[in-house]
Amino acid sequence: MRSVIVRSAAQAAMLELVTRQHQLFAANREFGDEADFDLPPEIADKYTLDITLDAGPPPGFLIELDPIGTMAGDVTLSVNSDGVKLPAGKW
């Protein structure tokens, strides 16, 4: 897969994680960490997942995907609980 296609798949997975985080918070009044989520198989060997939780107030999270394997050398992607996506030029 070309890196742009893989990055797009990673971004879609991240946005799904944001949705799932908000659903988890609505149900349990807390966000999840890496143990609560799995990356889709098509990107699991290309990125590592890191979730940083912020107790707040207000509580929040930062999701990061760090490139590995065939994606090593690409940018780290991140999105936070407010929907801020970085790096801006890669979204």
Image (cartoon, rainbow, N blue to C red):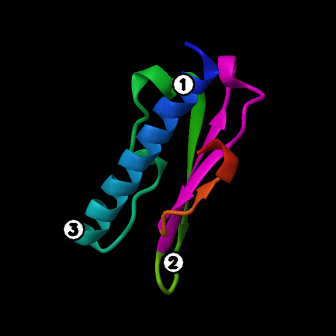
Disc number for residue 55: 2
Report, in whole angstroms, how far the alpha carbon at label 2 lies from the one at label 1.
32 Å
The amino acid type of the residue labelled 1 equals Val
Q: Position of residue 14 (x, y in %)?
A: 46, 45
Report, in whole angstroms, how far the alpha carbon at label 3 lies from the one at label 1.
31 Å
Query: 27 or 5: nearer the eye?
Result: 5
Q: Position of residue 79 (x, y in %)?
A: 55, 56
What's the magenta region? 60-81
Which residue is depicted at the point 36% across and 70% down? 30
Number of marks present in the image shown:
3
Q: As drawn, which residue projects farthest toward the top?
A: 1
The amino acid type of the residue labelled 3 equals Ala
- Give the structural element (helix, strand or loop) at label 2: loop
Report, in whole angstroms, how far the alpha carbon at label 2 lies from the one at label 3.
17 Å
Q: Are marks 2 and 3 in contact (CB under 8 Å)?
A: no
Q: Which residue is mark 1?
A: 6
- Give the structural element (helix, strand or loop) at label 3: helix
Q: Nearer the viewer, mark 3 or mark 1?
A: 1
Which residue is depicted at the point 47% across and 48% down? 34
Disc number for residue 27: 3
